[in-house]
Amino acid sequence: MFGCWRAAALWTAAVLILAPGLSAAQARAVTIDDLMTMSSFGEASLSPDGHWGVYERRDGWAMSSRFDLSYWSGWSTSELWVFGLSDHRPPQRLLDASEGRGHVLGPWSPSGRRLLIYRLQGDRFEAGVVDMQDRSVRWTGLTPNLSATGATAAWADDETLVLAVLDDLGLPWLMRQYSPPTSVSARWRRMAEGRTRTSTVVDTHDGVAGSDQAAQAARLVSWSVQSGEFRRLAEGRVLDFSMAPDGARIAVLTAGAPVPLSPEAPLVQSAFPVRSRLSVVTLSSGKVVTPIQPLDIAPHLLSWRKDGGAVLVWSRRDDQIWSAGGLTAVSAHNGQVTRYLHDGLQPLVVGEAIDLLHGVRATWLGADPILYARTQDGRFDWWRLGGDRPKTLTAGLATAPATFSGADTDGLTFVADGAVWRLALSGTTVRLGPDQAVSAAGMATEKQVLRQRLNAPEPRDWSPVQTGRGDLAIVTSDGDETTLGDPIAAAPDRLYAVSRSAAIISRSDRGATALWLLRAGRERQLDVVNLNMTSRSTATIVTVSHLDRYGRRTHSLLYLPPETPTSQIKGVVVSGYPGAASAGRAFQLDDFVVGVNPLVIASAGYAWLQAAAPDNPSAVGPADGYRESLDLAIAAARGLQPDLPWDRLALFGHSFGGYGALKAATETPRYRSIIASSAGTNFFSKWGEFSPIERADPQQGLSLLDRMGWVEVGQGGIGAPPWRAPQAYRDASLVLNADRIQTPVLLITGDRDFVSMSEPEQMFSALHRQAKAARLITYWGEGHFLWSPANQRDLYAQILGWLAETLDPSSVAGPPGGPPRSTSRLP
């Protein structure tokens, strides 16, 4: 089938041809083992010269070579495949088979001649460059740094690559932070030998906490493809960097001194922990320019002016809070600083702060900066700065766009109000074709930093859009429209890559997924995985529309066991998450690592209600009103499916959802079973407790602010430290309300979870002290989610065993006394 041009509407038929003889009678229910062996497509990209497409193909999760790197463990099975856009030959492996697996995509060089790739093999993570003329790869010997907040690599030109690299040849901290800390076992060994100290030391002084050991640092280097030599561009801990449009200079943020905590100011849970200092480096000479005034630079905004002469940032003085700062242009030539008046415009919504997760949205329109902001009582719009006062640019639209889809020398393009628009340098807005309603067709890759998602409009004069029927189209700045793919084909499920004349998309059918190349009016199927899944039956998903606690329309989802008469359904499992306004998206077959997948539980004979539970704007405590939200979803679902066993209800929750499940158990006896995974129970200890990885390696950074901030101003919402609001902490600590729980409780935790295992242990002890029914399962080596296939299998077996015990029609008081039943097999 590879290399065939065909209409995407034939995709389902192609599956049936390749898997003949399928029928409902032959189908069997999906299991966790099915999900763990499903292959997948990772990322894909199209070369700038329009010659090549490359994509990642990954084996099933269970085939990974290791499972201690959390999400990145799956990279160990990845292979890169390449195909020509203009020929019909099937895709081929990009690298020789002798290179093994573990390869993932990086960015193309400007002309498309070269491609940066990464390989994860054993305990090494390394960057390499593929020459597309002969498919040869040259490994740099450098360990690229992966960062949650900053860039990893950028091309200056086809011959010069800029990388943030680590001095050691191991793994980036982002990969290692969820793996079992080898430093602990090493310290235990040294303790047994008795010759060297095994202590870790942390200090706090004037609001700054830190370790006596140095953290893993990243420096910035340029690497020559021709010579293999590298040159240092910036020393210290590199936080982020951005290449100028002409490739001549690079703006670099490096870490300065820690930001001290203010005892009186509200805590920002994800506050940037260090000062960020800006420098601009000229690649050819190594000349470094810094701002002529000391500036603390906010994350997520390093926007270059089109001519490369200045970089736009949000800055403040060291003695200011972020909201007191403002947009600032720093000259790349002499460090001259230009501050722009914004007359009190607010760049974030009420309650948000500039931090690791939230950034200012701004860019350039010609020589002037434009800012996405709101007036005190108004809506968000784009405002032009640089004159006597800000001037609104998008007030004439019903809804202003949050991002731009393209930028060129003549202006910016964006999608809003169901159309494509052009924002010219003059500030005028013009609607471009087509007449039919469209929506933005964007995508974010797993390697794209938040800064790029917020503030990096692609350098192009066209916009990808999705039409009302789901087609993918390209609209140019001249208003021309081109539909990519066959007009009669099914709509894409996912967009992987897009250019002015081509796109890579996928379509799925019952778990089988095909990768397609779309061109104008035609399609080409590239690859297909998981055809065996078409012989699996999965739950029927019913949308349950109802009103929430505030009279707003919302939607819950009900998963019904496949091919199971209502009379044989064993029970109903209710799940939710406090603050999730709409259940919205249904679980897919590949959603099994980060949580429990309802499709597997439904296949074992249980209905599953994924309940909407919106925020309570006037909450007086964490998860306030959560039980009422669940009740509304249950009532609406019962109205649609009255014959389900609504007298046999279980309540499941993970993380804050686990807290919500336990809180509901203190308020109502209607559930016959509670399952709480990674659930906090004691706000007094949660407030200041270290996470396991911080205890082991405090030099990588203490996230005390995150722990305290979650309780004070995050989901916990207490509003103060324990000594200022002891009663609020007492009311929120469910372990102190355990006497109100009458329902059997299954508690699930991991020893490396940042929700400390001590909290479910305390709840288990409290229930034991009252001679109530409870079970505690601890997964050693696991964190907030389970990554080991053996542990994932056991998790589902344990949950199904618990449901069988607590929802059995003959059971009224929970699981029998004595040891738990054997749960070694899954249906």
Image: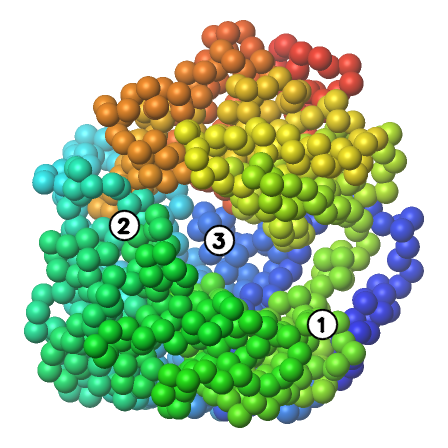
Quarter occupied by residue 632:
top right
Q: Position of residue 42 (x, y in %)?
A: 56, 65
- Residue shown at the point (40%, 24%) measured from the top left: 732
Q: Which sits in the foreground, 384 or 279? A: 384
Secondary structure type for disc 2: loop
Observer-nearest of 578 and 690: 578
Residue 808, image x, y percentages: 75, 20
Q: Is residue 477 left or right of residue 492?
A: left
Q: Amino acid at mark 3?
A: Tyr
Q: Is residue 683 above or below residue 137?
A: above
Considering the numbered disc 1 on the image, is that residue within a helix, a strand or a loop?
Answer: loop
Residue 705 picture location, percent across and down: 27, 41
Which residue position is annotated with label 2? 271
Q: Which mark is first along the chain, 1 or 2?
A: 2
Q: Is residue 426 above or below residue 373?
A: below
| Residue with the mark numbered 1 | 469
Residue tagged 3: 71
Amino acid type at image mark 1: Arg
What amino acid is found at the position of numbered circle 2 in the picture?
A: Ala
Disc 2 versus disc 3: distance between alpha carbons? 24 Å
Check the picture and name the quadrant holding the C terminus: top right
Sequence-wise, the earlier of marks 2 and 3 is 3
Q: Would residue 266 be seen by someone viewing this image from the given angle?
A: yes
Q: Residue at x 50, y 67 (%)?
A: 399
